[in-house]
Image (cartoon, rainbow, N blue to C red):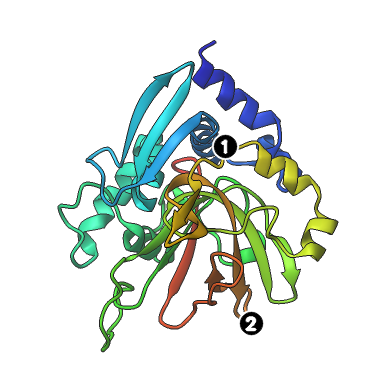
Amino acid sequence: MTRFAALAALCLTVGLTAAGPARADLPAPAATFIGNATALAQALADTRYVHETSVQGAVIRPLGGGRLDIDADCSGWVSHNLERLPLHYEALRQYQPQVAGEAGRPYPRATVYRQYFASLPAGAPFQAVKTLAAAQPGDILSWCLPGHCGVPYSGKPADDTGHVMVVLSKPIPNDARSAFLMVLDASSVTHYSFATLPEAVKAKHPELNTLYANYPTVRDRTEIVDGKTKTVTSGVGPGFILFGTNPDGSVGSFQFGPGDRTNSEGIGFAIGRPVPMGR
């Protein structure tokens, strides 16, 4: 068995079940998708966030000893892993030209994922997940930022179209209207780690420490800037994001890390779950 295959097998049986269902409970495509993503993330030795890196979505360099260097942005990272499900990825690629400004781009950006999941046609190889409470490992969560959601917008569009990520856990309650999800994504923004989760959440879910420790956190680096020590985030890695909900249970806001603002205005969210074709 190759190291990659061994890591994928490990991901199906160890660690991830702590905050989510056993892999046997996932649709086969979702299990394949999360298995590929976690195997890559567990092999990381170095990583950088690089916007629109290549036609493959991610640049992966073997470093020897089974370790990897990965350059990617958020949609490139998700797209690279989704390509291992060719029929699912092709469905997104066929939808991509329907989103203004996205035709001809090398892979679907976050806004394409969000708009596709929000308007899935009959027979699509994805299931729409309507509420945060229903999210589970192997889902793809995406959001679009103002000016990139396919609706009229009078302000200046955001510089990025949004964000997209691989869901690693079931929701971890924070309060009655919010919950954390552990995700694998490519980002330049520091997320919650296990250490920075609220004390009440850590006390109730100590298993999350083991889950988080399954992954090298090589994208989080300490640097000295103007004489001050600060954490810089760049590349692929694990993290927790706090999501708020609307009255109907759908996702309505996000907060990347402690002390960050909570973002909701003009933002659209959608979650898609890879499922068998022709289900």
Q: Is residue 196 above or below residue 210?
A: below
Q: Is residue 29 above or below residue 198?
A: above
Q: Which residue is mark 2?
A: 247
Residue name at image x 49 percent, y 32 percent: 44
Image x and y of residue 176, in percent: 75, 76
Viewer-proximal residue among 96 and 143: 143
* Residue neighbourhood size for the residue with mark 1, other residues' Cα within 10 Å, grouped as few (<14), some (14–19), many (≥20): some
Give the position of the N terminus as an image quadrant.
top right
Image x and y of residue 117, in percent: 42, 60
Residue name at image x 74 percent, y 65 percent: 198
Image x and y of residue 142, in percent: 45, 61
Q: Which residue is mark 1?
A: 216
Looking at the rendered structure, the number of numbered marks drawn on it comes to 2
Q: Secondary structure at mark 1?
A: loop
Can you name the residue that lies furthest to the front here?
227
Identity of the amino acid at label 1?
Pro
